[in-house]
């Protein structure tokens, strides 16, 4: 087993998955996702995710660390606190986070997600 993973190189060898947020969560636009999930091991996921413009509600039961590689997005918490994200910005979303994700300009991020143990 390889002990390291170069994300950009690994993504080129993986067939992307396509999707979108559930229709009842979409607030604006017609956002579409492309995901290159590069690691799926014992509740730990990592890879690259891209979304086209739109806005939808998000609800996290898991931990996620992500770094924006390209594009512009705004993440807004239920209390109205918002953060604008662009290339080079990093973000941690903790279990229990509720709010919205708005893609202003097609956004690509790398991510690490840790699912709750249960």
Image (cartoon, grey):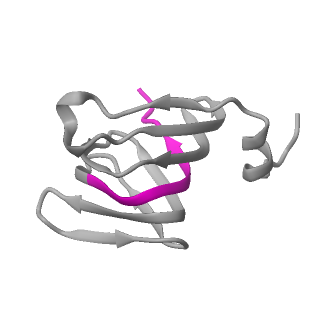
Q: Residue at x 29, y 56 (%)?
A: 102
Q: Residue at x 56, y 48 (%)?
A: 112
Q: Residue at x 41, y 48 (%)?
A: 52
Q: Which residues are magenta?
A: 101-118
Residue 18 vs 47, above or below: the answer is: above
Membership of 103 in magenta stretch: yes
* Residue farthest left in this picture: 79
Question: x and y percent of residue 84 in the render?
Answer: 33, 72
Relative to residue 113, is residue 82 drawn left or right?
left
Relative to residue 61, is residue 116 drawn left or right?
right
Q: Quadrant of the N terminus?
A: top right
* Residue farthest right in this picture: 1
Question: x and y percent of residue 57 in the render?
Answer: 22, 44
Q: Residue at x 50, y 42 (%)?
A: 114
- Main secondary structure of the magenta stretch: strand
Question: x and y percent of residue 6 in the render?
Answer: 79, 52
Question: x and y percent of residue 43 in the render?
Answer: 54, 32
């Amino acid at each position: 087993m390889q002990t390291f993973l170069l994300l950009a190189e690994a993504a080129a060898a993986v067939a992307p998955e396509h999707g979108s947020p559930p229709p009842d969560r979409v607030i604006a636009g017609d956002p579409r996702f492309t995901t290159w999930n590069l690691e799926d091991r014992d509740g730990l996921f990592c890879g690259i995710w891209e979304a086209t413009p739109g806005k939808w509600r998000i609800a996290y039961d898991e931990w996620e660390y992500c770094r924006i590689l390209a594009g512009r997005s705004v993440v807004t918490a239920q209390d109205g606190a918002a953060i604008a994200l662009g290339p080079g910005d990093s973000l941690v979303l903790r279990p229990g986070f509720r709010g919205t994700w708005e893609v202003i300009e097609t956004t690509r991020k790398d991510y690490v997600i840790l699912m709750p143990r249960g």
